Image (spheres, grey):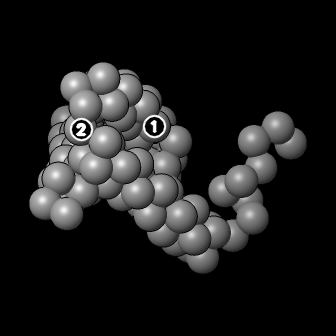
Amino acid sequence: MIEFAAGMLVCWLLNVVQLGIAFFLLASSEKSLASVYVLTLALWLVQFGYVVPIYRILKRKRRPYAAHGLLTAACISAVITVILDYKIFGAAAFKFWS
């Protein structure tokens, strides 16, 4: 149970770091506005870039509960982010190829 919570905590701390990087980019220059949008609005998509490798490392190190906690937190974050993006920006936030 403690390992599961630790895996969730790792994921959410990395999400906070990601949002901090987005805030730093926003504060530093307007030229990086596209990066800020990707880091904040597509948090659910970007986070899988670091969650999947950490998940595989934890599974190899025989820490299955921490790995499942990490994956659970990533899925929770992804669902919340998609719902908030849809509520704030509507269906336009999900028109990728139009």
**Circle nearer the N terminus (2, 1):** 1
Label total for image: 2
Query: The N terminus lies in which quarter of the figure?
Result: bottom left
Q: Is residue 37 left or right of residue 91?
A: left
Q: What's the residue at 60%, 76% (across, down)?
A: 87
Residue 17, by quadrant, is top left
Of the pair 88 and 3, the residue shown nearer to us = 3
Q: What's the residue at 45%, 37% (across, down)?
A: 48
Kind of residue at disc 2: Arg
Tell me residue 97's x, y (percent).
Answer: 82, 37
Of the pair 80 and 95, the residue shown nearer to us = 80
Q: Is residue 33 left or right of residue 87?
A: left
Residue carrying label 2: 63
Query: The C terminus lies in which quarter of the figure?
Result: top right
Identify whether 88 is placed above or below 21: below
Using a 10 Å C-alpha cutoff, classify the residue at mark 1 as few (fewer than 14 neighbours), some (14 to 19) or many (20 or more): some
Instruction: Give me the C-alpha separation between circle 2 and circle 1.
Output: 19 Å
Q: Is residue 39 left or right of residue 25?
A: right
Of the pair 8 and 40, the residue shown nearer to us = 8
Tell me residue 78's x, y (percent).
Answer: 49, 57
Kind of residue at disc 1: Phe
Q: Nearer the viewer, mark 2 or mark 1?
A: 2
Q: Tag 2, which secondary structure?
A: loop
Q: Are marks 2 and 1 in contact (CB under 8 Å)?
A: no
Q: What's the residue at 36%, 49% (across, down)?
A: 68
Residue carrying label 1: 48
Q: Is residue 23 visible?
A: no
Q: Tag 1, which secondary structure?
A: helix
Identify whether 31 is placed above or below 38: above
Question: What label sits on residue 97 in the rendered view?
Answer: none
